[in-house]
Amino acid sequence: MKKKLILMGVAAALVTATLIGGSLAYFQATGQRVKQQINTKNLGIQFNEVGKDGLGKDIYTQIPNGTVYVKEILPGAEIQKEVCITNTQNTDLYTRITISKYWGSFKGSEFIKDGNKIAEKIKIPAVQDKDNSGDKARWILQKEDNEQMVLYYTKPLAPGENSKIFMDLIQISQDLQNDYADLGVELKMQADAVQILVGQDAIMSEWGVLATIDDQGYITKIEE
């Protein structure tokens, strides 16, 4: 009964937030615009590959459907790929991303997954934050297994703002056997988000984790 009352209280908080002109919503995206289920505003996240132009300035190129493909795989290969997300709409949000790793083969433009191959042989090293300015914006790796990793961005992402990169390298295991020959890799990235209004309750309700949020709105800890 106590648990039921707590959940009812969270639901009431979410409804109240929408009634006072806020708009608290949860959505999933794979690089496409997704309309809120609560009101007329839109939330949007776009996955971008980060590169440099001829003057050394960052340029951002959208990754279609939040999916990265690597077609030619060699044992021990290291593929440079810097990826961030961008808040493409008009509302501040908290976000998490889930990266799923697959082996498979290409049939024309179609990728055919091979569930018998070991996804652990595809590695995405944690990005080392070299920013010594005291900026608290970073990615928290909350969960990782052989096939999937889940990361939370600590900073409320403002409209039009780019996150820090969450991936800069794809590593292929050195000990690939012959049955991996001619296979490729798919990384499927999904973004989920809630608005920052009553953010702790929204995160608990939608993602089932307890977020510790400081007085500046930064997430400092994620606990299950």
Image (cartoon, grey):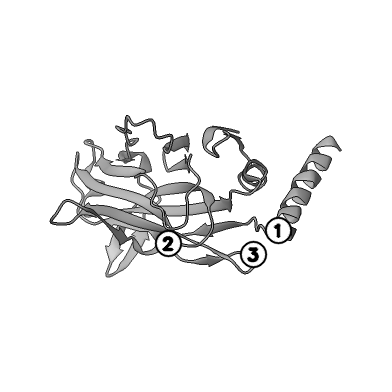
Residue 31 marker = 2
Q: Which of disc 2 and disc 3 is earlier in sequence?
A: 2
Residue 52 place in picture, x, y as percent: 19, 53
Q: Between marks 3 and 2, how big is the CA–CA gap? A: 18 Å
Q: Find disc 1 in the rendering and name its residue.
A: 18
Mark 2 lies on a secondary structure that is loop
Residue 129 marker = none
Q: Between marks 3 and 1, how big is the CA–CA gap? A: 11 Å
- Quadrant of the rendering where the N terminus is positioned: top right
- Horizontal side of 11 relative to 49 (left or right) equals right
Nearer to the camera, 26 or 88: 88
Badge 3 density bin: few <14, some 14–19, many ≥20, Cα 10 Å: few
Identified by mark 2, the residue type is Gly
Residue shown at 32%/36% (left/top)?
125
Above or below — where is 155 with respect to 128?
Answer: below
The answer to which image quadrant residue 210 occupies is top right
Residue shown at 62%/45% (left/top)?
199
Above or below — where is 145 with respect to 17?
Answer: above
The answer to which image quadrant residue 186 occupies is bottom left
Residue shown at 42%/43% (left/top)?
147
- Horizontal side of 219 relative to 180 (left or right) equals right
Q: Is residue 116 visible?
A: yes
Residue 221 place in picture, x, y as percent: 54, 31
